Image: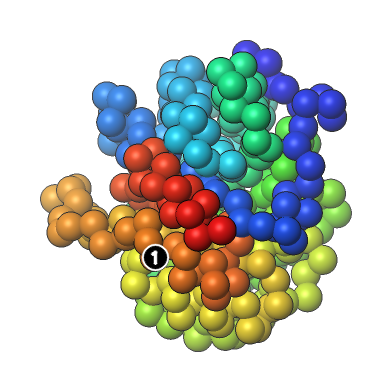
Amino acid sequence: MTSDTSRGDRPPALADALASGTVVLDGGMSNQLASAGHDLSDELWSARLLAERPEAITEAHLAYYEAGADVAITASYQATFEGFARRGISRDRAADLLRLSVGSAREAARRARAKGVTRPLWVAASAGPYGAMLADGSEYRGRYGLSVAELERFHRPRLEVLAAAAPDVLALETVPDSDEARALLRAVRGLGVPVWLSYSVAGDRTRAGQPLEEAFAVAADADEIIAVGVNCCAPEDVDGAVATAARVTGRPVVVYPNSGEVWDAQARAWNGRPTFTATQVTGWRRGGARLIGGCCRVGPGAIARIRESLTAGG
């Protein structure tokens, strides 16, 4: 697999693109892999396939690029040194897999261009919260009992590896707690890669219960930040979050909510019906959203409709 990181084959800076227009993100990695028949019932979730079926990861990214996504978010959300160690994977091998997550997305971009996609294609290296490593649902609660300094020490090593793999941006995503956001923003200092920060929210608060105005203020003055917003939330929570993020930070806003269905952890199944429609995105853009896509249960078909809706709206 080629890493596709030569400067001559790289798109312009993502921050420049946000200054002049709207960029379409991909959708959920896990639902795309599951629809292809892969079993994700594992603490490593989609990150397990980096070790066992990396081609499946590349194919999933390619499906989103072909559907109209401009940005592929890597399969490293749940990829950590600690999580891999529990599976007997050495630290050196874990670092290889983190780098591979970026290389897989670059390879998908190369294949998309070979198939005729001519628009710029970016790669966002995903860094999920501490709770994702625990695989016990605490990523939707925060408040782990760790200090900001302890969380910074957890995040920094894998962020260093991901940054060295030369993604276009680091996606600090599904962050449930403003304390963890502070730790992440400290951990990315000096890495030389721009970042976006997106919280997981419920209503007008983070999952840990902090008001969004306070949570977004954490990122207002961080030099590395190119966008702030929300992901892995109900579509109904996006409008208020977009308005607050834009007002508090003055930065472009990133939004990629779930389908609107609800995960039943006991039954390990999704319930309800989707409430996320492509027509919602034009309102989010009017409010300041410049990176727009989907998270859990949002597939390539929905991403194609999002692109159509944004294109039709100018």
* In the image, residue 280 above or below residue 128: below
Locate residue 7, reporting x and y percent: 84, 29
* In the image, residue 203 above or below residue 137: below
Residue on which disc 1 sits: 280
Q: Say which residue appears at 18% left-offset and 57% top-offset.
A: 273
Q: Amino acid at mark 1?
A: Gln
| Residue found at the very far top of the displayed protein | 1
Q: What's the colour scheme?
A: rainbow
Q: Is residue 252 left or right of residue 86?
A: right
Q: Is residue 19 left or right of residue 66?
A: right
Disc 1 secondary structure class: helix
Residue placed most toward the observer, 127 or 281 = 281
Image quadrant in which the N terminus is located: top right
Locate residue 293, reporting x and y percent: 48, 52
Q: Say which residue appears at 56% left-offset and 18% top-offset.
A: 115
Q: Is residue 150 left or right of residue 208?
A: right
Number of callouts: 1
Q: Say which residue appears at 62% left-offset and 77% top-offset.
A: 246
Locate residue 48, reporting x and y percent: 43, 29
Image quadrant in which the C terminus is located: bottom right
* In the image, residue 249 above or below residue 128: below
Q: Label 1 crowding class (10 Å Cα cut-off): few <14, some 14-19, many 20+?
A: some
Residue placed most toward the observer, 110 or 51 = 110
Locate residue 296, reporting x and y percent: 36, 50
Can residue 269 be seen here? The reply is yes
Can residue 51 be seen here? The reply is no
Q: Say which residue appears at 59% left-offset and 77% top-offset.
A: 245
Q: Quadrant of residue 204?
A: bottom left
